[in-house]
Image (cartoon, rainbow, N blue to C red):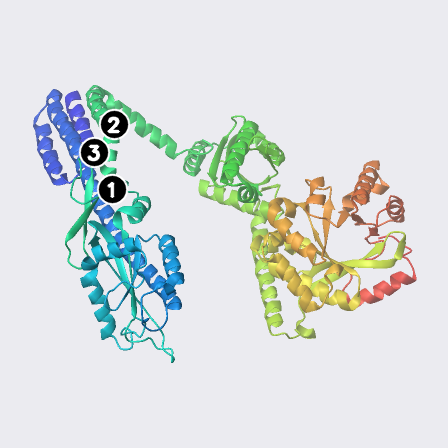
């Protein structure tokens, strides 16, 4: 039995090896045939030692095939590289010929500007300027020689005896080329080609003075009185450049030809490549360019040779080790399979149970519970995790997930199962005695406290502030199936997030009713916003009978010490619901934020506030609240400025109130948006300062214009000294930073007098005014200026 098991394992390894080899070698069919033969041999033999021979044979064959394939690939790579270099040299040489032709054409135009328009009567030294031009331009363009001849091919400037002798030597070699250029010129109509352009110069590769050269001949074109080119050229310019000079240097430099040299005959040594240069007109060989080619294949093979030898040695050793390990492979496979099953049930990042394992343990607990054992399931969702992940990257987000899991595990201390369901969602499973079922609330409260503490990430470079929302469902006995328990916990979590997050909600039957009511309220809010939006698109009034159910009320703000003077008002939205009556913002603003309706609602409030403020409180500051979700919208600033322009409302009279949560969620986006708005004159106020994770750096970093002292501190002024200390500290801080302050919730004269004494700039509260509709705003302002209230709200 052991031998048969070992044979099966060996065959499986052998089959996998063949599969990998077949995908990388051209002899796949041969290897597959050998696989079939060896397979039949394995099925007939019981002795495991006999399988070593085919395994070793296949190993040797595979090694040889790898070596042959490597050598073949190297040779093919060298041939391809060599052909590519030759093609590039051919192309570059042709480019050089074209370049010489173009250069000579340009030089011929220069001669045309210096020479007379007719054949001179004698060859004299009157052409000194022409001769100097020729000497200069020859050096500039790197030509070996430039010669000016007439239609018969006689040298025009023959003052230099050496040049005359050299021309007499090369003239017979240039005769055919010269006659072809001259005859082509004579055959054209008025010295123009078929396309109408003047006859250009021509260049060819010739043997001159026993050396290969690029020679170009160009007619010197003269224009007649009417601007046409004369049909017969009076002069021709001949220029040549040897290939073994500047041309070869440029080829060697630009093409990377190592050790490039020119030879008249083929005398390349081993390791060099020869490129034959042929005459352009006849195709006769006139020279050879020789260089040491760059052969990447040989270079790679040379570098790989020691590695191939080492690899063959390693493969041989591995085959020997394989034989030794075959007897134990089945045990390792079984252990690996078990480990894989465990990994499939664990979260890779936190090593906590994943969703599948959590569900399995919940089923086990549900099946084993009795009447005195209760099951508690808690769903945990991290608040503001996405903002941290988006702002600092996934690496920081992963570190935050790990730290949060560690804190929750520390709270549980082995008393239950903590699982990660995915993303920033966790779940807790507790089994408690009936008398301890209330204990679970304390556990989850501790988890909320732990997650609320700041997280120091990336070696203390980043401090992250998050929270968590928890939904809890419990069951005793077997009357609640696991699926229903999970659903209830999810419903409770949804309710916790809807309540503003950072809290826990225990499932009860009324939550279902509240959730249905919430969904209905969301649908009604969406319908109302759609109705308002449709009326806005039509640019028509909805009419008195169909006025918007959403109303903007205003609570006036008064200057401290002179409360009869109204400095502005805060816009507060109300919903006059047909079923539920007048709803305050806390009933529907969270719904708008969680469902994405807050942008439409915020635009409506801002439009109404600007229109009413312009007509009812001209030149007064109108404060409008902004939600964190609105500030995360990259188009928020543009939307605000567009509304101000349409309403013809001065930006300096608008004050946007936002909480520090809006700044923490996405600080870079918030800073960019607020900077754009403040640049247009809009003021920024920080609402509820001191009630959350207040940071003094926010006051400077985001350019805050006003701090609003929360009503919770104002309320303590009459009862506790702590409230007075906080209010005084905030006011002093703001004054030193040049920031104005507004105290909210002022309801008594004692509160008013204290706030005036500590230097608060503005006051707001029931002592001066309750929120009123737009129609009552002007009358209320007038009433306030006449007399102060004689009673407290």
The answer to whether marks 3 and 1 mark residues whose Cβ atoms lie closer than 8 Å is no
Classify 10 Å Cα crowding around label 3: few (below 14), some (14-19), many (20 and above): few
Q: Quadrant of residue 105?
A: bottom left
The answer to whether any part of residue 189 appears in the image is: yes
Indicate the secondary structure of the residue bearing disc 3: helix
Nearer to us of marks 3 and 1 is 1
Q: Which residue is mark 3?
A: 16
Q: Which residue is mark 1?
A: 261
Q: Which residue is mark 2?
A: 307
The answer to whether any part of residue 251 appears in the image is: no
Looking at the image, which residue is at 18% across and 24% down? 6
Nearer to us of marks 3 and 2 is 2
Nearer to us of marks 2 and 1 is 1
Q: Is residue 746 left or right of residue 419?
A: right
> Which of disc 1 and disc 2 is earlier in sequence?
1
Classify 10 Å Cα crowding around label 2: few (below 14), some (14-19), many (20 and above): few
Q: Quadrant of residue 299?
A: top left
Looking at the image, which residue is at 31% across and 56% down? 160
Q: Quadrant of residue 461?
A: top right
Q: CA distance from mark 3 to mark 2?
A: 24 Å
Q: Is residue 85 left or right of residue 129?
A: left
Q: Residue furthest top?
A: 324
Indicate the secondary structure of the residue bearing disc 1: strand
The answer to whether marks 3 and 2 mark residues whose Cβ atoms lie closer than 8 Å is no
> Which of disc 2 and disc 3 is earlier in sequence?
3
Depth check, front residue: 526 or 762: 762
Label for residue 568? none
Q: Position of residue 168 (x, y in %)?
A: 22, 57
Q: Position of residue 27 (x, y in %)?
A: 13, 39
Q: Is residue 709 above or below residue 108?
A: above
């Amino acid at each position: 039995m052991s031998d048969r098991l070992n044979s099966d394992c060996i065959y499986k390894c052998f089959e996998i090896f063949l599969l990998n080899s077949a995908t990388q070698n051209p002899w796949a069919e041969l290897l597959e045939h050998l696989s079939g033969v060896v397979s039949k041999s394995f099925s007939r033999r019981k002795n495991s030692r006999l399988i070593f021979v085919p395994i070793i044979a296949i190993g040797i064959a595979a090694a040889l095939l790898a070596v042959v394939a490597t050598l073949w690939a190297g040779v093919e790579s060298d041939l391809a590289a060599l052909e590519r270099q030759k093609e590039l040299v051919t192309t570059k040489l042709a480019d050089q010929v074209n370049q010489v032709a173009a250069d000579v054409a340009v030089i011929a135009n220069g001669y045309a500007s210096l020479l007379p328009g007719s054949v001179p009567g004698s060859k004299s030294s009157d052409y000194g300027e022409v001769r100097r031009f020729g000497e200069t331009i020859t050096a500039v363009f790197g030509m070996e020689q430039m010669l000016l001849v007439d239609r018969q091919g006689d040298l025009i400037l023959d003052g230099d005896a050496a040049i005359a002798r050299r021309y007499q030597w090369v003239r017979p070699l240039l005769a055919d080329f010269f006659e072809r250029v001259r005859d082509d010129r004579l055959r054209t109509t008025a010295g123009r080609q078929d396309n109408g352009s003047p006859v250009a110069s021509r260049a060819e590769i010739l043997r001159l003075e026993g050396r290969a050269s690029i020679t170009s001949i160009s007619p010197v074109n003269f224009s007649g009185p009417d601007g046409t080119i004369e049909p017969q050229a009076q002069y021709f310019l001949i220029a040549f450049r040897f290939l073994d000079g500047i041309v070869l240097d440029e080829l060697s430099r630009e093409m990377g030809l190592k050790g490039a040299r020119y030879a008249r005959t083929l005398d390349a040594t081993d390791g060099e490549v020869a490129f034959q240069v042929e005459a352009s007109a006849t195709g006769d060989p006139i020279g050879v360019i020789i260089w040491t080619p760059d052969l990447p294949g040989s270079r790679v093979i040379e570098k790989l040779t020691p590695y191939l030898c080492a690899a063959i040695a390693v493969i041989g050793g591995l085959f020997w080790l394989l034989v030794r390990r075959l007897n134990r492979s089945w045990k390792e496979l079984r252990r690996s399979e078990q480990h894989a099953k465990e990994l499939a049930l664990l979260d890779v990042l936190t090593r906590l149970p994943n969703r599948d394992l959590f569900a399995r343990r919940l089923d086990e607990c549900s099946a084993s519970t009795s009447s005195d054992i209760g099951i508690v399931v808690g769903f945990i969702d991290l608040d503001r995790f996405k903002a941290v992940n988006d702002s600092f990257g996934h690496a920081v987000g992963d570190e935050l997930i790990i730290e949060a899991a560690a804190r929750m595990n520390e709270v549980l201390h082995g008393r239950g199962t903590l699982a990660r369901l995915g993303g920033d969602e966790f779940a807790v499973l507790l089994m408690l005695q009936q008398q301890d079922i209330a204990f679970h609330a304390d556990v989850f409260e501790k988890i909320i406290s732990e997650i609320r503490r700041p997280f120091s990430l990336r070696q203390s470079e980043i401090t992250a502030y998050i929270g968590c929302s928890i939904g809890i469902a419990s069951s005793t006995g077997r009357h609640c199936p696991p699926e229903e328990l999970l659903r209830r916990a999810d419903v409770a979590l949804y309710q916790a997030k809807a309540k503003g997050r950072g809290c826990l909600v225990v499932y009860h039957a009324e939550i279902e009713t509240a959730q249905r009511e919430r969904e209905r309220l969301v649908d009604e809010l969406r319908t109302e916003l759609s109705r308002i939006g449709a009326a806005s698109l039509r640019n028509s009034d909805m009419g008195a009978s169909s006025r918007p159910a959403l109303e903007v009320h205003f609570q006036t703000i008064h200057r401290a010490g002179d409360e009869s003077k109204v400095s502005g008002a805060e816009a507060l939205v109300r919903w006059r619901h047909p079923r539920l009556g007048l709803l305050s913002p806390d009933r529907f603003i969270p719904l708008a934020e969680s469902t994405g309706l807050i942008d439409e609602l915020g635009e409506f409030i801002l439009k109404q506030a600007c229109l009413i403020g312009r007509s009812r409180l001209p030149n007064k500051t109108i404060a409008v609240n902004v939600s964190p979700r609105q500030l995360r919208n990259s188009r928020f600033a543009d939307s605000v400025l567009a509304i101000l322009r349409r309403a013809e409302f001065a930006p300096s009279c608008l004050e946007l109130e936002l909480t520090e949560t809006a700044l923490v969620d996405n600080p870079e986006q918030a800073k960019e948006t607020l900077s754009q708005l403040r640049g247009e004159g809009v003021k920024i106020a920080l609402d509820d300062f001191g009630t959350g994770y207040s940071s003094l750096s926010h006051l400077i970093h985001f350019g805050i214009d006003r701090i609003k002292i929360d009503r919770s501190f104002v309320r303590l002024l009459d009862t506790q000294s702590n409230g007075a200390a906080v209010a005084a500290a905030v006011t002093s801080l703001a004054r030193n930073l040049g920031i104005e302050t507004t105290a909210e919730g002022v309801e008594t004269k004692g509160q008013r007098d204290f706030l005036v004494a500590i230097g608060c700039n503005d006051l707001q509260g029931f002592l001066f005014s309750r929120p009123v509709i737009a129609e009552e705003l002007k009358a209320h302002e007038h009433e306030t200026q006449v007399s102060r209230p004689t009673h407290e709200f």
